[in-house]
Amino acid sequence: MSSLQSIGTMDIQQQEKRRIREVAQDFSTLTLTPENFHAFYIKFINLRFPMQVAHLLELRYLINHTVDRYKTPPMTPDYRQFRESLQGAIDSFIDNQRYSERMLKILSMLRDLHYTHSINSRNAESRLRGALVANRVERGRSVRYGLLFILAGVVCGIFGLAMKTSGWMVELLAAGAGYIAWRYFHKLPGLDRGLEQMTHELNDILRRRVQSLNWRILIHKLALVLGYKRIPGVEVFHIESEHDHPGQRVYH
């Protein structure tokens, strides 16, 4: 009985590992845009081989479809320097001139996506930091004004008690000051919730920001995924054969 339970537990663990591996290889829900750049880059840079054929074909289509619509930038000094800085690394890994040019275009596209992603991320950060400052200022103002009107209400109450005949005007002022103080303090929970939410959004923006690109890993993995390079011993994809035993895989 114990052996059967152990086997069942191992099967469950293997299925879970397989599911996690498949999710890590599945790019079908992603698009190559500045908004999704972080998700694509982190997933791609951590990609493990071999991949399932379906996932590999989806990834190839995503990259090729996006780069086909990408307009190569003009040969500015900056772009020329970018090409020259990566040309050596590409040539040391890819010996086909057509593939080399295609790789440069893909890397240029990724650089532009990363640049737009960084600009959008920093703009969002700046907007949130400004909103956080405004929130803290508004909270401090609400606390100060709330305390001020509480004090005004107390003064009115003391003044009314000190008078031999308490007039309705003093009572009205005390009630009005108390109501206004309540309004200011009533705003504090909402401001605190907004502060917490904006802090969470800011942390998420900072967490999702791609600070820099690892060009070497990008070149190597792009070349393998797109079929520009084959390395002995590295299996890029596998096919599960229906005629083989369960779990047996044919690698390519």
Image (tube, helix red, strand yellow):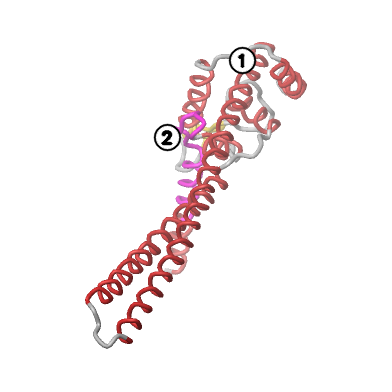
Residue identified by numbered label 2: 29
Question: Which amino acid type is shown beneath numbered disc 1?
Answer: Pro
The magenta stretch spans residue 93: no
The structure residue drawn at horizontal position 55% and vertical position 14%, both measured from the top left corner, is 71
- First in sequence: mark 2 or mark 1? 2
121 relative to 17, above or below: above
- Left or right position of 226 against 174: right
Quadrant (top left, top right, bottom left, bottom right) of the C terminus: top right
Q: Secondary structure at mark 2?
A: loop
Cα–Cα gap, marks 2 and 1? 28 Å
**Mark 1 crowd level (few <14, some 14–19, many ≥20, 10 Å Cα):** few
In front here: 124 or 72? 124
**Can you give x and y, in whole percent of width and height, for residue 29 in the image?**
42, 34
The structure residue drawn at horizontal position 33% and vertical position 66%, both measured from the top left corner, is 180
131 relative to 138, above or below: above
Quadrant (top left, top right, bottom left, bottom right) of the N terminus: bottom left
Residue identified by numbered label 1: 73
**Can you give x and y, in whole percent of width and height, for residue 211 in the image?**
64, 39
**Can you give x and y, in whole percent of width and height, for residue 231 in the image?**
68, 28
Question: Which amino acid type is shown beneath numbered disc 2?
Answer: Thr
* Magenta region, residue range: 13-35
**Can you give x and y, in whole percent of width and height, for residue 85 in the image?**
76, 23
The structure residue drawn at horizontal position 34% and vertical position 77%, both measured from the top left corner, is 156
